[in-house]
Amino acid sequence: MKVSRDQVAENRQAILEAASRLFRERGFDRVTVAAVMKAAGLTHGAFYGHFASKDDLVARACAHAVDPAARAAAGKPYPAGMRDFADVYLGTDHRDHPAEGCVFAALGTEAARASVETRAALTASIRRRIDTFADSAPDDTAEERRRAAIGGWSAMVGAVILARLVDDPALADELLAGTRAWLDRPTS
């Protein structure tokens, strides 16, 4: 049966959405191609019409997870400024639902050992996020704004990782709230 170009694009989108969600939820190694295809509502055999390998899927799913246009199309656009972003990012909903959240907090250490293509896609996203945050930072010079963007975002990612890691709900909440308070402190 011949599939239209529109259907091929929809199927690819469904695969990327499913893979992105499953990878963030379980990690790269604990997700099989068969599980991704089942979650996408497609047969395992359809996979190779879209991707050369699981590594290819990992790279493209990570790129998809951090693509601002894809997030906006899914009704989950990133807030532009770092402070607005922190309101969402340091929330308990983000902490408690890694499959729907940030790929860096969910897969950071695992992604550091991923393919060159995966790391390149994530590096490009990191650069975009730093630039976006730096553009909204209140500091005087471009260097200060960039430093604030890097430090603030790094603190947020680290706080979410630690809040997900601990087995003490009160400490998990404190990690998020403490990081938020640190970001809101006066800088001068």
Image (tube, helix red, strand yellow):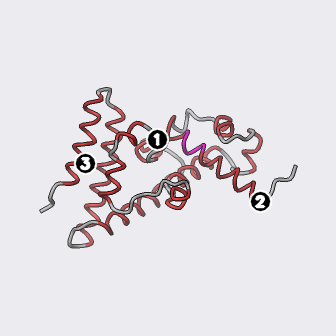
Q: Nearer the viewer, mark 1 or mark 3?
A: 3
Q: Report if residue 61 lies within the magenta region.
A: no
Q: Tag on residue 180?
A: 3
User: In this image, 100 relative to 166: left or right?
Assistant: right
Q: Image point 59% across, 52% down: which residue?
A: 60
The residue range painted magenta reads: 18-22
User: CA–CA distance between discs 2 and 3?
Assistant: 45 Å
Q: Nearer the viewer, mark 1 or mark 2?
A: 2
User: In this image, 125 relative to 89: left or right?
Assistant: right
The location of residue 75, given as percent across then percent down, is 51, 55
Furthest toward the front, the residue is 75
Instruction: Determine the image quadrant of residue 44.
Output: top right
Q: Secondary structure at mark 2?
A: helix
Residue type for callout 3: Arg
Query: Which mark sits nearer the N-terminus, 1 or 3?
Result: 1
Q: Which residue is mark 2?
A: 5
- Confirm whether residue 117 shows in the render: no
Residue type for callout 1: Glu
User: In this image, 140 relative to 66: left or right?
Assistant: left
Is mark 1 in CB contact (under 8 Å) with mark 3?
no
Q: Which residue is mark 1?
A: 110
**Looking at the image, how many numbered discs can be counted on the residues?**
3
The front one of 135 and 177 is 177
Instruction: Give the crowd class for mark 3: few <14, some 14-19, many >=20 residues within 10 Å.
Output: many
Instruction: Give the crowd class for mark 1: few <14, some 14-19, many >=20 residues within 10 Å.
Output: few
Is mark 2 in CB contact (under 8 Å) with mark 3?
no
